[in-house]
Amino acid sequence: MNPPIHLYWRCSRPIDVVATILLPIIMSSLSLTQATAQPLSYTLMSYNVENLFDIVDDPTTEDEDFLPEGANLWSHKRYRRKLERIAQVVSRAGGLSWPAFVGLVEVENGDTLSDLLRLTPLRKAGYAYSITQSADPRGIDVALLYRKELFEPTDFREYPIYFDGYPNKTTRNLLQVSGLFRGKYLLNLLVCHFPSRREGVRQSEGFRRGVARKLREICDSLHHAQQGQGHFVIMGDFNGSPEEPATRSDLGAQLSMPRDGLEQSSDTLRLYNAFARLPSLEAPAGSYCFRGVWEQLDQIIISESLLQSKAQLRYHHGSARNYCPSYLGHEPRQGGHLVPWRTYAGPHYQGGYSDHFPVLIELLVEE
């Protein structure tokens, strides 16, 4: 019986042969990967959290209703539930990753934010925060959460608001946090809470316009100091629609967002409201509902520098939306879209999240 025949491929430099065979395949695969690589997406969120108070009395503010013995019977259990509710919204809003930035409105103080980042799942997210200390009678402020691994603050400022002819009128300070996003993009983030309309829309309009003019002054000053190299994101509760004079005229946030930015000028800062004209099929028709009427009180405004389609850092067109999953709302008696599930309805404790829906946009980064 003949022995089996073994065939051998003899080569003095086998590594070169393998490389010769595999290198074109590897290079082709890398080229395909580079050609189909998707930009990284980062969520920015603004959320009026409806009276995030702790249970400690602050003798300098009117926080008596939010104490254990106060009108709202604001207990430790209710406070902890509120923190857990907010943390749940933040954790889900970013999809597979935590939002890069979260602007918060109606926060009492830094202690509540420390509790939020210490006592809830947000402790895993690596957030830090900045918060104002306003002269608001109730002691509510605005704040910004940011992921430390993504953003390095270089400048923090807050701006008090004064109204000519109204020396006793107070409102929330404006918050400005500037720094480097992903180590190289100069980003200016501003959080605001414009004066309410409790006195009437027309009667209070002048106060909102005054805040808008101050906000514009801050942005123009930063733009000039940074020689037009910084990007801007303004977020918060404007207590008015994008079409109202305060936002449209005094702040100068344009309603029509170009698909690609115009020729940029280092002398002029152009702002665009991402929530001015959401698609007609977008539901709900706003972030806040009062007596069956929806309004887009919560908005995010961006600079034209984020609208350049070929820029490494840019706005994701079409990403602006009201975040309104079913767990955040309840069906109104008259039917229609779910309305925000509030913490309180008047003096009655509901145990919900907030009387506002959060708003979101996404920024894209090309590696």
Image (tube, grey):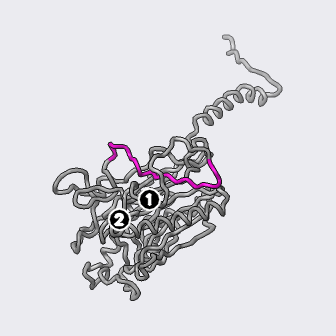
Give the residue at mark 1: 247
Residue in the image at 32% along x and 56% along y:
295
Rendered location of residue 265, percent (x, y):
63, 50
Whether residue 280 is in magenta: the answer is: yes
Q: Earlier in the sequence, mark 2 or mark 1?
A: 2
Residue kind at label 2, given as amino acid type: Arg
Q: Is residue 96 visible?
A: no
- Quadrant hosting residue 85: bottom left
Please tell me which residue lies in front, 82 or 2: 82
Please tell me which residue lies in front, 18 or 249: 249
Furthest-top residue in view?
1
User: Tag 1, which secondary structure?
Assistant: helix
Give the residue at mark 2: 85
Furthest-front residue in view?
165
Residue in the image at 47% along x and 76% along y:
162
Rendered location of residue 259, percent (x, y):
51, 41
Q: Are marks 2 and 1 in contact (CB under 8 Å)?
A: no
User: Tag 2, which secondary structure?
Assistant: helix
Residue in the image at 45% along x and 68% along y:
210
Furthest-left residue in view?
333
Question: Which quarter of the figure is the N terminus placed in?
Answer: top right
- Quadrant hosting residue 120: bottom left
Residue kind at label 1, given as amino acid type: Thr
Depth check, mark 2 against mark 1: the one in front is: 1
Please tell me which residue lies in front, 84 or 156: 156
Q: Residues within 10 Å of mark 1 (few under 14, many from 20)?
A: many
Whether residue 97 is in magenta: the answer is: no
Stretch of the chain drawn in magenta: 264-282
